[in-house]
Image: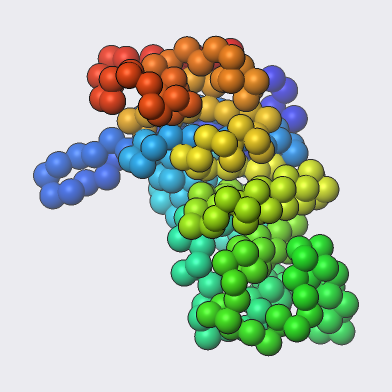
Amino acid sequence: MNSNNVVLQVDKLSKIFHQGKKEILALDEVSFNLLPGEILGIVGESGSGKSTLGKILAGLFLPSSGKISLLGKDPSHFKTREKARLIQMIFQDWKSSLDPRMDVFDILTEGWKIHHLISQKEIKEKLSRLLDDFDLSNDLISRKPSELSGGQLQRVVIARALSLSPKILIADEPTSSLDRYLRRQVMNLLKRKVKELKISLILISHDWEAVTYLADRIFVMFHGKKVEEAPPSFFQKNPIHPYTQKLIHPKSHLPLELKWEETNTYFS
């Protein structure tokens, strides 16, 4: 694959956490590429290492080993603010990621002010377009997060992340704590906006339905390893790894606990 056509390259990324004298291998030599405009789904249960991977890519954790290339460069070559514009993250606990003291106006315009992206005169017009793009009414701009519904809150979180026109959006469980109707709304919104803005999306989730609906390509994580990688259509027909089979068919009689030696990687 031509590296010029890749927005993100991850090579043998590992992360070890220390708890006293104990070492916990949270991420074990994970490698992948991300293409421009691609939606990559990373799926696995709690403790699989997927959220740790997302936080490393967003610059919140340092890897213990391995390499990351962002737009062909080491991420350290970018200034902090520049990298923050290139990679935005929607956190798993997305409700608490909003400052409860700020109203929607301040939440959505803060990034533009920090990065000096637009003049004061342009804010009103650009904010109106942003609200319209994300199906948010103008009367919400004076409200605090506590005064918004779950669906409104999540749309504000997504709008804030995409307002900076990042190259990569990392969404960690973006539909968590939403009902089925709102989950589908958020999935459709993400899919539409990512394609419109030609942004690459890394979707991290344990929700197999959401990942297969959104993703162009999926890889499955188990015990910090990438164990299987393929397009969604392949997984629907012929998942190879036993852990993947268990994720797709949770009521099957496959063993709940797999051994470390069963975590070979399968590519399709």
183 sits to left or right of 121: left
Give 43 or 73, whichever is nearer the viewer: 43
**Residue depicted at x 24% and y 39%:** 24
Residue with the most extreme left position:
21
x%, y% of residue 156? 65, 68
x%, y% of residue 113? 71, 77
In the image, residue 239 sits, relative to residue 33, either above or below, namely above
Quadrant occupied by the C terminus: top right
Give 210 or 108, whichever is nearer the viewer: 210
Instruction: Give the number of callouts.
Output: 0
**Residue depicted at x 83% and y 68%:** 132
x%, y% of residue 264? 39, 14
x%, y% of residue 213? 65, 36
The answer to whether any part of residue 103 appears in the image is: yes
220 sits to left or right of 109: left
Quarter holding residue 48: top left
Q: Coloring scheme of the render? A: rainbow
**Residue depicted at x 51% and y 49%:** 173
In the image, residue 24 sits, relative to residue 138, either above or below, namely above
